[in-house]
Amino acid sequence: MNRREAIQRTAMALGYAVTGPALVGVLKGCKATPEVNFKPVFFNEGQAASVAEIAEIIIPKTDTPGAKDAGVPGFIDSMLKEVYSKEEQDKFLKGLEEFDADAKKEYGDSFMNCKPEDQVALFKKHHDAAVSALGTGGPTGWWNSAGGADKPFVLKVKELTLLGFFTSEPGATQVLQYNQVPGPFQGCVPLSQVGKAWAT
């Protein structure tokens, strides 16, 4: 598939530009491969389980594959290991640690030991707060003086989850409409026949 177009579509879904490390990773060839029980290379087992659960909250399994089915947790693990700088890795892990600490404060237990509905509520709380902070001027307030993005942890996970999912085979072929390239050219197609966005 055309990775550049997939990145543009993911950026539109997120509502802002995809950050540098995520962009570099996809262009270098990091891809989500379907494996539910992946062997982490960056995270420890507990961190990997938490990130997998957060990704599944963002894109749950319905009549189409969820984030776990599309191999998104392994994609996030590989991206952090192979693409992100040490500083960015540390910030991500700190954000995950603070997220887990908030679960203990709110529900008296680690995120992974919370009930599913409490996990969703905790994610929603953090996500809503991060989106509210966006205001109307976009994410510019999170750009540091060195020119790097420093968005909240939940938005970093969301960005990587959407990027991994929509550049995976299940995401591109079962959720988006997939038109294999090269394929037939149809210059004018009624919108009623298209129905949803295309992945190419």
Image (cartoon, rainbow, N blue to C red):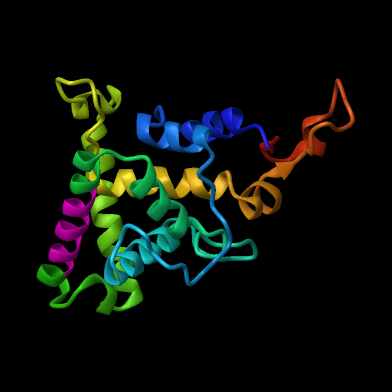
The residue shown at (30%, 56%) is: 124
Q: Which residue extends farthest left?
A: 105
Q: Is residue 184 above or below residue 50?
A: above
Q: Residue at x 31, y 71 (%)?
A: 45
Along the horizontal axis of the image, is 114 left or right of 198? left
Q: Which residue does the image show at 44% across and 63% down from the upper left?
A: 56
- Image position of 138 (left or right of 39): left
What are the residue bounds of the magenta stretch? 92-103
Q: Position of residue 28 (x, y in %)?
A: 50, 35
Q: Which of the 4 image quadrants contains residue 16?
A: top left
For residue 181: magenta?
Answer: no
Q: How many marks?
A: 0
Q: Point out the image quarter for the N terminus.
A: top right
Magenta segment's dominant SS is helix
- Residue 136 position in % (x across, y down): 28, 25
Q: Position of residue 70 (x, y in %)?
A: 56, 59
Question: Residue at the spot x=58%, y=62% of the render?
Answer: 34
Image quadrant in which the C terminus is located? top right
Front in this rendered view, residue 72 or 142: 72
Say which of 20 and 159 sits in front.
20
Name the spot of residue 36 as percent of width and height, x first: 51, 69
Residue 175 is left or right of residue 151, and the answer is: right
Front residue of 133 and 175: 175
Left or right: 103 in relation to 65: left
Work out whether 186 lies above or below 126. Answer: above
Q: Quadrant of residue 185?
A: top right
Q: State which quadrant residue 24 falls in.
A: top left
